[in-house]
Structures are given as C-alpha cells and as structure tokens.
Amino acid sequence: MSGSDGPGAGESQSLAALAPGARATVACVTAPTPATATRLADLGFTPGAVVEVLRRAPLRDPVIYRVKDYELCLRREQAACVHVVEVDR
C-alpha cells in the first residue's frame, strides 16, 4: 500500500496524508488495536465509504473530515490507520 505514485494512481495512502479539499474512498483500516478498529468503523470509516478532508487545526492536528454526511474530527494518529484511494475532485 504505497502512495508513491501520487494521487489518482489507484494505490492507497493514509488518510492523514491528504490535503484539505481532497476526496477519497476508504480501502481498509489497519488499526493497532481491535478497539481502535471498531471505533473507526463505528464512525463510518468502512471500506467503500467516501471521505472528504474539510480542514485542519492550526497545528495540523486534529483534522475535520466529512464521512457519510456528517463531520467528525480525528487526530493524525487515528487517520493514519485509515487507508484510502483518492478520487477526482
């Protein structure tokens, strides 16, 4: 799972790597604990879900995302567990 080919290359990258305004589809979640994986799934970060990066806090953490028609905030550490494929804007 590498984003080295750049956005739009069809390869997954971390949700934390996306800039505000980017849209992506969740490919998978690789959380360090089952509790974290469950929490992310409960928040709507499931394979196929469309996520939009809305804005970042001044120090880049946390970040506000739109997923399944609602907005939520994740720290970069949590967002790094979500692997996405960027879609055209």
Image (cartoon, rainbow, N blue to C red):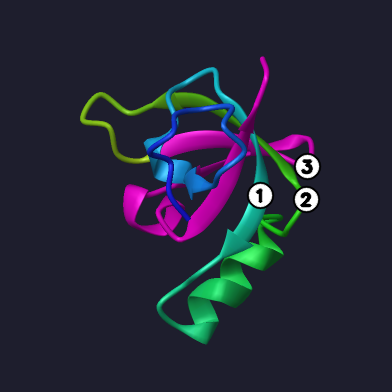
Look at mark 2 in the image and give the residue it sits on: 48
- Compared with 59, 67 (above or below) is below
x, y percentage for residue 30? 50, 69
- Compared with 55, 5 (above or below) is below
Select label 1 or label 3 by which is in front: 1
Residue type marked 1:
Val
Give yes or no for residue 67 being in the magenta stretch. Answer: yes
Q: Which mark is residue 26?
A: 1
Tell me the residue at 66%/49% (across/down): 26
Question: How many numbered marks appear?
Answer: 3
- Compared with 30, 4 (above or below) is above
Residue type marked 3:
Lys
Select label 2 or label 3 by which is in front: 2
Q: Nearer the viewer, residue 3 or 20?
A: 3
Query: In the rendered structure, which disc, 1 or 3, sits on the residue that comes first in sequence?
Result: 1
Give the alpha-carbon distance from disc 2 to disc 3, as whole Å. 11 Å
Q: Are marks 2 and 1 in contact (CB under 8 Å)?
A: yes
x, y percentage for residue 67? 70, 41
Helix, strand or loop under label 3: loop
Residue type marked 2:
Gly
Give the alpha-carbon distance from disc 1 to disc 3, as whole Å. 12 Å
Residue 7 lies left or right of residue 10; in this view the side is left
Q: Nearer the viewer, residue 22 or 55?
A: 22
Look at mark 3 in the image and give the residue it sits on: 68
Give yes or no for residue 77 being in the magenta stretch. Answer: yes
The boundaries of the magenta stretch are: 63-89
Query: In the rendered structure, which disc, 2 or 1, sits on the residue that comes first in sequence?
Result: 1
Residue 76 lies left or right of residue 59; in this view the side is right
